[in-house]
Amino acid sequence: MAALGGTLAGAVLTTQLAGPLLAQQAEQQSSVYQQLDLFGDIFERIRAQYVEEVDSSDLIEAAINGMLTSLDPHSSYLAPQDFDDMQVQTRGEFGGLGIEVTQEEGFVKVVSPIDGTPAAAAGIEAGDFITHVDGESVLGLTLDEAVDLMRGPVGSEIVITVVREGRSDPFDVTIVRDTITLTAVRSRTVGDTVVLRVTTFNDQTYPNLKEELNKAAEELGGMDKVNGVVLDLRNNPGGLLTQAIKVSDAFLNAGEIVSTRGRDPQDSERYNADEGDLTGGKPMVVLINGGSASASEIVTGALQDHRRAVVVGTKSFGKGSVQTVIPLSGNGAMRLTTARYYTPSGRSIQALGISPDIIVEQPPREPAAAEDSAEETPQFRSEADLRGRLSNDSMTEEERKQAEEEARKAEEAAKLREEDYQLAYAVDILRGLSVLETE
């Protein structure tokens, strides 16, 4: 009887609750239909009464894009041509200026210029605001419309007006459009350190990274001769999530890389590293700045949380969301924010960015006059410059050569500090770690 009573009570409770819930659902559905009727009414009035004849497909496309862009700065409608351009960009070659942009306070904000592109050569910096394109204001335009203004034939000239923090007045920058061919990863050696400069996360990033790492290690005589690796992600605007996971996995043996969580808990994903570190566990430094976004932050967060690398530089951009590109009928697509991502420790960096373990600002370049005056600084003499000095008879020829080689490396390090202070700082960290290991 107790069981039956419980069943009957449950049935009564269900009946009591179902009524109001069904009524509420019906009311919400009715409200949606009323809004759609309103949209249809406005659409027809525009077509019939607007001062000029308008294309119906343009109206619908604008309405769709307005609906998406009202959600967040990264959701948008991709017309067929824009969808084609995006697919080309992920393959690594496209036409344009070479900047990754977002929208903030109605203006176009530069996330980062891309290495070796016209924008980078013209001095465009991460954090710059673009207010005008060829004299036309971008205020009030959608991001896609502003980007369309900046597109044009290769070889054509464009003038953009830039507002930069620290400068009181806007200034114009003239850029010649060019074909942008992205080399995802470049390598170099600084002393016994391998520097991997990753500019984007496209289809070629992980294969390029593996190839460049092996090439640089061979130059130094094998991975055993490498004292560490600098992963330079400065001004890297991100790209494909799959490539961010592969690059992180390249330096991890186990553990979570990143997790993504959508509105439905069933859509959550967790990505883990497989065994196998391409460097064999060599010390690492990751370089980031305000232009490091999205996939760059996923890699940085994974290596930082696992204490696999020391993070050096300045705070990253803070894009902690995942966009899914969904093809639509008519050959277009929509880019929709479908999830937030979380680093292995469970933190979201959305609008916060990743804070470096060691904050190192990149000093502004000195003007030419200051460089000239620096050259006039008096040089101090040493014991070795004195006439009739005693010779050092305690050093063997091999030790003398080693001392000369160390002096040469010190001079190279000093020169690197003038060219790229942040990179020099990262190299010094790895050099210091290698000295401790040797001792």
Image: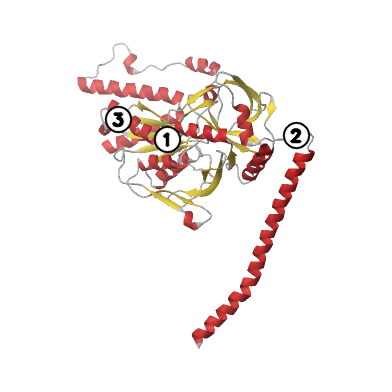
Residue type, numbered disc 3: Ala
What separation in Å lies between label 3 and label 2 (alpha carbons)? 65 Å
Q: Is residue 168 above or below residue 314?
A: above
Can residue 133 be seen by looking at this rendering? yes
Instruction: For mark 1, give the secondary structure.
Output: loop
Distance between mark 1 and mark 2 Cα atoms: 44 Å
Pointer 3 or 2: first along the chain: 2
Q: Residue at x 69, y 55 (%)?
A: 33
- The residue nearer to you, when weighing 400 against 219, is 219
The residue tagged 1 is 203
The residue that disc 2 covers is 53
Q: Dividing the image into 4 quarters, which one contains the C terminus?
A: top left
Q: Residues within 10 Å of mark 1 (few under 14, many from 20)?
A: some
Q: Which mark is residue 217?
A: 3
Q: Secondary structure at mark 3?
A: helix
Give the number of the mark in front: 1 or 2.
2
Q: Is residue 309 visible?
A: no
Residue drawn 26% across the image and 16% down it: 390
Asked if the residue at tag 2 contacts the one at tag 1, i.e. Cβ–Cβ closer than 8 Å, the answer is: no
- Residue in the foreground of this view, choosing between 222 and 420: 222
Q: Position of residue 414 (x, y in %)?
A: 40, 24
Query: At label 2, which amino acid type do we have?
Result: Glu
Alpha-carbon span between mark 3 and mark 1: 23 Å
Q: Identify the mark nearer the N-term, 1 or 2.
A: 2
